[in-house]
Amino acid sequence: METQAEPSTLSVVIADRRPHFRETLRRVLVQRTEAAVAGEADTLHAALRVVRSTGANVVLLDIDLVMGQPTGRLRAMADSLPGLTVIVLLSEDTPGYRSAIADRWGYACVAKDRAESELLRALPHVRARDRVSGG
């Protein structure tokens, strides 16, 4: 199910191979935030289709969906969607891994095993940045 959200609302696409984990994140977003879930996807390309069709401004992206993708290609895809915030969902979390993702792609990270608490801390920063940039 895909929905078009108000421009001032965070509209989130959940991209993860595991349906159960997508459902968990959906539940957290619906019950604990004001974000609208625009849709779900189980591949990178499906996530991009949902983002483009709904105008979503945030994608929660499973790191496993981008492994093996050329770095430049990922950056080009994100750059083709101005205003999109990517938050990478990490299966294995280390400070070095987070730093490498931030340095290489400029994306924020959320550990899957702490997704609820970290996501609840990350989303307000996205909202504040959107207000400042006029998104």
Image (tube, grey):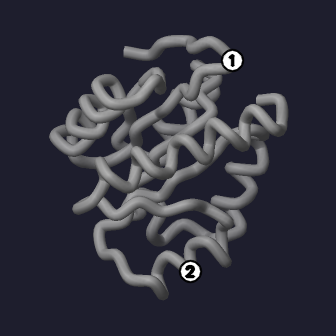
* Left or right for 126, reference 134: left
The answer to which image quadrant residue 80 occupies is top right
Question: Where 95 sits versus 50, above or below?
Answer: below
How far across and how far down the image is residue 101, in percent? 56, 73
**Circle 2 SS class:** helix
Which residue bears the numbered disc 1? Answer: 7
Separation of marks 2 and 1 at Cα, in angstroms: 31 Å
For the residue marked with disc 2, what is the amino acid?
A: Ser
Say which quadrant the N terminus sits in: top left
Crowd tier of the residue under label 1, counting other residues whose Cα lies within 10 Å: few below 14, some 14–19, many 20 or above: few
How far across and how far down the image is residue 45, in percent? 51, 42
**Circle 1 SS class:** loop
Q: Residue at x 51, y 43 (%)?
A: 123
Direction right: furthest residue: 133
Which residue bears the numbered disc 2? Answer: 99
Crowd tier of the residue under label 2, counting other residues whose Cα lies within 10 Å: few below 14, some 14–19, many 20 or above: some
The answer to which image quadrant residue 100 occupies is bottom right
Q: Residue at x 22, y 33 (%)?
A: 23
* Left or right for 82, reference 44: right
Say which quadrant the C terminus sits in: top right
For the residue marked with disc 1, what is the amino acid?
A: Pro
Question: Where 81 sits versus 49, above or below?
Answer: below
How far across and how far down the image is residue 89, in percent? 39, 58
Q: Are marks 2 and 1 in contact (CB under 8 Å)?
A: no
Direction bottom: furthest residue: 96
The number of numbered badges drawn on the structure is 2
Q: Residue at x 45, y 46 (%)?
A: 60
How far across and how far down the image is residue 90, in percent? 37, 65
Which badge, 2 or 1, comes first in the chain's sequence? 1
